[in-house]
Image: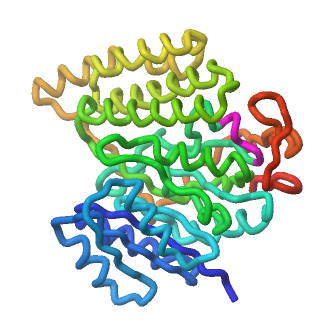
Amino acid sequence: MSPTVSVVIPAHNAAATLGETLASVLAQSHAALDVVVVDDGSTDGTAAIATGTGDPRVRLIRQERGGVAAARNAGLGACRGEAGGVLVADAVWRPATVAALLAALSAGRPSVGLAYCWSALIDEQGGILPGKHCAGRHAGPVWPALVTGNFIGNASAVLVHRDCLETVRFIGQAGIQGAEDWRFYLDIAEHWHFALVPRFLVGYRQRRGSMSRNLAPMIESHRQVAAALRTRHPALDERLLRRSEANLYLVLADRAADQNDTAALLRLLRRALRCDPALATTSQVRRLALLLPRCLASRLLEWSGWRRPRPAAQVFLTGAELPPRLRQPLQNPSPEASRTSRTGQRRPGRAAGNAASAN
């Protein structure tokens, strides 16, 4: 009998996209699903869409507006499956997503507590954004790599074993959010290994919005997680945390470039280099710096009323698989090394046996 997998979908005023998201879940090749939609204080038709599927696998939880972390935790607390994942209400899964993640998770037990895959970034119409993706390459004991930044990219690309869900929850607060995923993964990586499915199985929707409105909460959320790391691991190398903050600024700078926000792009690049001057020689910084003139030119053309013609979009759910990366996924240090604390002393860990091999 196939194990049941729980899927938590937190939703706040998500009527525009929730139907497509639910359809992608209910079309999974792994049919033993427990789908929990958490209506987080919506004022639109979100609840009606959740209850209107006619599928007995879908349950609805309604609560007052509490924010991302609270909604996810409410759903996880109601999970019935042997493993669980979170899917944001405007993302989509390919039909094999749950099956592939569950296979990787099961193959690595008991040392593996989390499996993740790659994500293609898509626009509001579901078209793949060329060159935009989340494709981490770390597997096994990943805690040191994870300290320097969230290489998974988004919560919709993850499946977590029930053992982890019984002890780990999302930590965050309404109004200051953006790093809840990162902290959740860090807490899991302290005790378990990660498995990687190197396939693009998640479509992660990107929305055009105000950079200035979203920057401050994301940066503050990241700093709160970094402060918690310093408290929990006082001997942690400060250079890792500076690199982590710099990597955040580079991610945000890339978003600013997508929106042709030249001022934000320049400001974020400066912040990244102040945190970690060594990044100045990296290809990522050079690429972003070269985008500055293009962003300025695009903004001037927008002001003039000119619109660049868009190429035909490849739709995520029906299009061909995105090209795989040429390099193999990284295999991190041995399980023995992963049980070494940040102070240099051995620490007890729940991870046992060899790290799961990447698919």
Query: What are the residue bounds of the magenta stretch?
Result: 140-145
Tell me what residue is drawn at x 21 percent, y 23 percent: 299
Depth order, front residue of 28/217: 217
Where in the figure is residue 242, as x and y percent of width and height? 56, 20
Count of number-bearing discs:
0
Task: Using residue 130 as the reference point, say whether residue 117 is left or right of it.
Answer: right
Where in the figure is residue 291, as x and y percent of width and height? 39, 20
Depth order, front residue of 170/126: 170
Task: Using residue 228 as the reference point, say whether residue 192 is left or right of it.
Answer: right
Q: Is residue 297 above or below residue 208?
A: above
Q: Is residue 192 above or below residue 343?
A: below
Tell me what residue is drawn at x 61 percent, y 60 percent: 167
- Residue 350 appears in which quarter of the rendering? bottom right
Tell me what residue is drawn at x 49 percent, y 67 percent: 76
- Residue 218 appears in which quarter of the rendering? top left
Tell me what residue is drawn at x 85 percent, y 46 percent: 335
Q: Which image quadrant: the C terminus?
A: bottom right
Where in the figure is residue 37, as x and y percent of width and height? 37, 72
Where in the figure is residue 329, as x and y percent of width and height? 73, 44
Q: Is residue 4 above or below residue 350?
A: below
Q: Which image quadrant: the N terminus?
A: bottom right
